[in-house]
Image (cartoon, coloured by chain):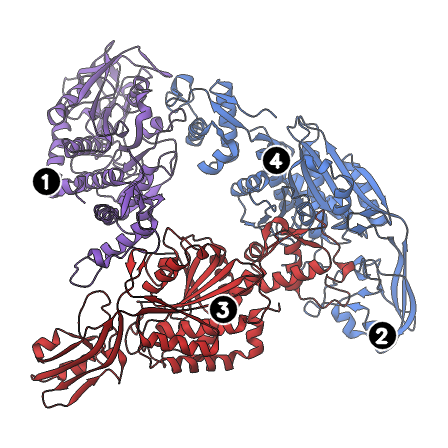
Chain colours: A blue, B red, C purple
Amino acid sequence: MNGIEAALEQRGVEKTGVDLHQFASELYPICRSITGNGTRETLKRIQRLIQLQIHEVKSGADVFDWTIPLEWNVREAYLNRADGTRILDYRDCNLQILNYSVPMRARVQLDELKKHLTTLPNHPNWIPYRTSYYAPEWGFCMKHKQMQDLEDDEYEVVIDTTLEPGFLTYGELYLRGQSTEEILISVHVCHPSLANDNLSGIVVACFLAGLLRGRRLRYSYRFVFVPGTIGAITWLAKNKENAQQIRHGLVLTCVGDANGFHYKKSRRGDAEIDRAAALALRSCGEPYEVLDFSPYGYDERQYCSPGFNLPVGCLMRSVWGTFPEYHTSADNLGFIHPEKLAGTLRLCAAICDVLEGNRTYLNKKPFGEPQLGKRGLYSGAGNEASAEAISARLWVLNYSDGRHSLLDIAERSALPFPAIHDAAELLRERDLLAAVDTN
Amino acid sequence: MNGIEAALEQRGVEKTGVDLHQFASELYPICRSITGNGTRETLKRIQRLIQLQIHEVKSGADVFDWTIPLEWNVREAYLNRADGTRILDYRDCNLQILNYSVPMRARVQLDELKKHLTTLPNHPNWIPYRTSYYAPEWGFCMKHKQMQDLEDDEYEVVIDTTLEPGFLTYGELYLRGQSTEEILISVHVCHPSLANDNLSGIVVACFLAGLLRGRRLRYSYRFVFVPGTIGAITWLAKNKENAQQIRHGLVLTCVGDANGFHYKKSRRGDAEIDRAAALALRSCGEPYEVLDFSPYGYDERQYCSPGFNLPVGCLMRSVWGTFPEYHTSADNLGFIHPEKLAGTLRLCAAICDVLEGNRTYLNKKPFGEPQLGKRGLYSGAGNEASAEAISARLWVLNYSDGRHSLLDIAERSALPFPAIHDAAELLRERDLLAAVDTN
Amino acid sequence: MNGIEAALEQRGVEKTGVDLHQFASELYPICRSITGNGTRETLKRIQRLIQLQIHEVKSGADVFDWTIPLEWNVREAYLNRADGTRILDYRDCNLQILNYSVPMRARVQLDELKKHLTTLPNHPNWIPYRTSYYAPEWGFCMKHKQMQDLEDDEYEVVIDTTLEPGFLTYGELYLRGQSTEEILISVHVCHPSLANDNLSGIVVACFLAGLLRGRRLRYSYRFVFVPGTIGAITWLAKNKENAQQIRHGLVLTCVGDANGFHYKKSRRGDAEIDRAAALALRSCGEPYEVLDFSPYGYDERQYCSPGFNLPVGCLMRSVWGTFPEYHTSADNLGFIHPEKLAGTLRLCAAICDVLEGNRTYLNKKPFGEPQLGKRGLYSGAGNEASAEAISARLWVLNYSDGRHSLLDIAERSALPFPAIHDAAELLRERDLLAAVDTN
């Protein structure tokens, strides 16, 4: 099968893993949020790799039930002791400022300060990540250990942020295939220095786009890089008609850690993407689990809202919220691994290969088996075909009755999709199969 | 959820258990059968609690394939030794007379007598319960130990029963709800001093009617207190049209012993009552098992006969015929427990709550998630909603597409029905949901 | 149930096992192939037992995508050492000649000879069975041990075979039942001295035909004895219209060894034959497994090709290709057992009993249960019916709503089919059931 997974192998899987991690490292220090210059800068760096279109939507604009908020930017944010000693600076670690914190300049006593500090008592050396997008608050996040060491003193709080009319920014890449039917790949771009939760998805999506670019594709592909929730809602609001073209979709998140895969099915539960993902997982060589849809998680919540009900699943390694490093400073560049990022990219490629290659055929010699031997398609007589290849031919011939797709046949036979697809290509060349569907 | 289960809690579950057992104790000594004064008396005592209508159907009347038998009553029944010593009197334990025994006055030798005695060799201190409704026989039941001790003597048999044209008696209570669609609760009232098998169902049904009385109900409720088999067939024959109003139904039997629950599904197998019962059981805190329908058991046999095929299941704790005390004197007041009777009543209330509360809604903001935060329906910002409550809101919003009922959503989400129902009520208040069904 | 299984019991199961093995022993020495006198002779011997029609189809005739090959016969085939010592003669074991070997007379060196020898290194004392029907080759099969002992010598090869225009031969027996709808029993007759793989199926099919002959049958039965693959394709090509009469079918193969049963479902997967086989297996008293259809195996491949998609399953004990003796001289008369052949025949009889007896009825007293007691159909009052018999009556009455067949009821009740069938016969006699289907 001369597919997208093969293109990755040609590029070199190991090398690609290193490149993926390298790109994540480049994006890691940027202070992203649901709006602002960090996200804008992130999208610009992505533009250097793939021809992203960057869209800006004004603060105050209505997107379905929501409103685009004021744009948030940070000039500086720090905490000094009374004697001027700097004890915390957001430039050292951008998780340290409460994301979307309102501006604040004040001198406060320890007791008052503590009301605005978030820590992780169970992980005293980790800094938590916290946001307050829609409730105006100010605050810092720090190591629990550091907070415990704070002396009873007066502290100088400087939070020089701006919350002003501006824009929500998102990126979009459209690759035109033979059909106007689309495959959607969606990742969120609103988390600051968190590696698994957001950077892993971003870099895999970028490289997947790279693998697809320039290929002859059956489907059109749409990659969206959006702030979580509000960004996905914004994209849907701006593309209500377009969204009807989406035939299959994946949200990618937390795809770089050392865990096996978790695929969360679309709300439909039996969509082609759900079956294609399960099929590719079956052959991926890593442990995996397929989960039912539930209405919380990442942006599949929005794509699968009842008004859209799009066939969009969510691919993860560790499941959001279930691993201790989630939304902490421990979700850093050491938490994601080149080979795991590459493994996810390979799985995405294999899923796309299933979707691209899934067709329904009609056996042109349906009465009894056609004689494969006289066509050199059977074993023996010096024919070197593997047992798997011959089995795949028999499966494709037997089930190509116009009602079973190659995906159906792969599921039923327990053979890998590429073997089934290759068999179908060969049988079509030998004029034993006719295509039924036309797109 | 301000439902029927909550009404029970308000009344006091523990106290109710004591009351249930107390009422069972009051009914225990009465000698019931499929006809006669014992059953009539039982129904009259129930009338003191709930406004039962008592119906009488004449001996000889045809009810489908059956005929109402002669009415049976006992004046006295005893066994004396030749010297006049009383060795058995049915007044001591009414199981001792073969139920529906024909009258007999005779002096018989031990050998002859033994042909008319039934005992339990495996439980020599228990008295069995036996009937012969349709084959004219006379006889006694006694402890096996007692039979073994009988000396080779002549015995005086006195069975002063009457089998005369009279009536079959049954009771019925109808509680009018908003809809004429009905929920049926059926219990049998034909067993003499047996506690789990018949009294437990009777008292739970009475108290359930008590909990429902005076409430604003969606469904109408019909409680029937009938002799087993012939009584249910009689009720069906007299209510062939009415029966079409039954949307959900439960037969209650053997619901007071120490075992967990067994729910036997209706013949349909996927009726709403079957799903509601399974859902309530999932949250009841006791062990339980759901059984497939089979055409033997209690009066669900009749309600689920193919000409009716009503959605009527059967709720039990121990399953009839499978516990050693079944149909013996060991099924006495000590075999049923106040807290178990109360637990069954609570489960019945929870099932009714599901049926009453099960509606289908339409999310009025179906494109993306509505912004719960601005409505105070999300966590954070001092909002004290539990994770379960918020999860329930997301589930209800996502699946309220007009095709999923709250029951569907509760099943799918694995959340308790009350949480789903409360979420729906709240979302409806906030104008996020519209009702789809109208009854 | 006065069925086909009962007829076998009347004949004597043990005696029949001996007769089955005896007939296999008679056929064992014959050198069969997909054409030729060995197969012709085999069919003639079968004709002595059952009234087989023998058909001949000319070499060169087109059958769907295939062509009838030249007819193959062996006059002699041996291998001598240079000094004339005979070291291998196909008359000693007909597996020793490559089946369909082209003729050859030559003196060859050991090295050259070895290119034409097949052995089993893992089973050095077994002779393999090999064929080359469509690629012209010559060769011998021998024990690996014998090959290792061959000295570096010149050898005289004599393969006096003929490959000439002739016929493909197959046999067919049609037993006319009340309906023109057919049950197909198909076995292959193309393997030389292999006992489990081909003789076991042949002898069971012959004796099943014997059990059916002269009975009043609901279905017509068609037994086909065909060379594997090409023979089944030939039969289908000659009977394309007839094949539409096939309602149920079984391929029998490898049914004499010591293993439990394997039933491979038809391509449809839920055909009546699949359910009947599973039901009969449930009661057969031997271990068994039901396998999904796959498009390789025996002639079910052809019957289940998509142009036909006939409801034909495959009954085996050990599964072809999975036991070491498969296609070797170890698949001999000691590998098949009288009691196992008889057990398979009994299972086939039980499956036919299900198919013959499976009807759909309508309960004529569908409102409540009919009163069985007054008809002597209930327990008690001297009625000796077993609990199973009474249970079967209740099941049949409850589910005979015109939508559930006796097969459905047997599956659902977990009662043996004969118990359900007997109950239905009895209830029909008592005018409680009316037949719904008419064939």
**In which quadrant will I find the C terminus of chain B?**
bottom right
Do tags 2 and 1 sit on the same chain? no
Amino acid type at image mark 2: Glu
Q: Up-down: is B321 above or below C424?
A: below
- Which numbered dot is residue C11? 1
Q: Chain of mark 4?
A: A
Q: Is residue A371 visible?
A: yes
Residue B151's x, y, as percent?
A: 9, 85
- Is C51 on the left or on the right of C298, as rendered? left
| Residue position marked by numbered label 4 in the rendering | A352
- Is B439 on the left or on the right of C245, as rendered? right
| Residue position marked by numbered label 2 in the rendering | A112
| Camera-nearest residue between C25 and B263 | B263
Residue A304's x, y, as percent?
A: 66, 46
Residue C4 location, quadrant: top left
In space, the residues marked 4 and 2 are separated at their CA atoms by 54 Å
Secondary structure category for the residue under label 3: helix
Amino acid type at image mark 3: Leu
In space, the residues marked 3 and 1 are separated at their CA atoms by 59 Å
Residue B154's x, y, as percent?
A: 7, 83
Secondary structure category for the residue under label 2: helix
| Residue position marked by numbered label 3 in the rendering | B347
In space, the residues marked 3 and 2 are separated at their CA atoms by 51 Å
Binning the other alpha carbons within 10 Å of mark 3 as few (below 14), some (14 to 19) or many (20 upward) gives many
**Closer to viewer: mark 1 or mark 4:** 1
**Closer to viewer: mark 3 or mark 1:** 3
Do tags 3 and 4 sit on the same chain? no
Q: Chain of mark 3?
A: B
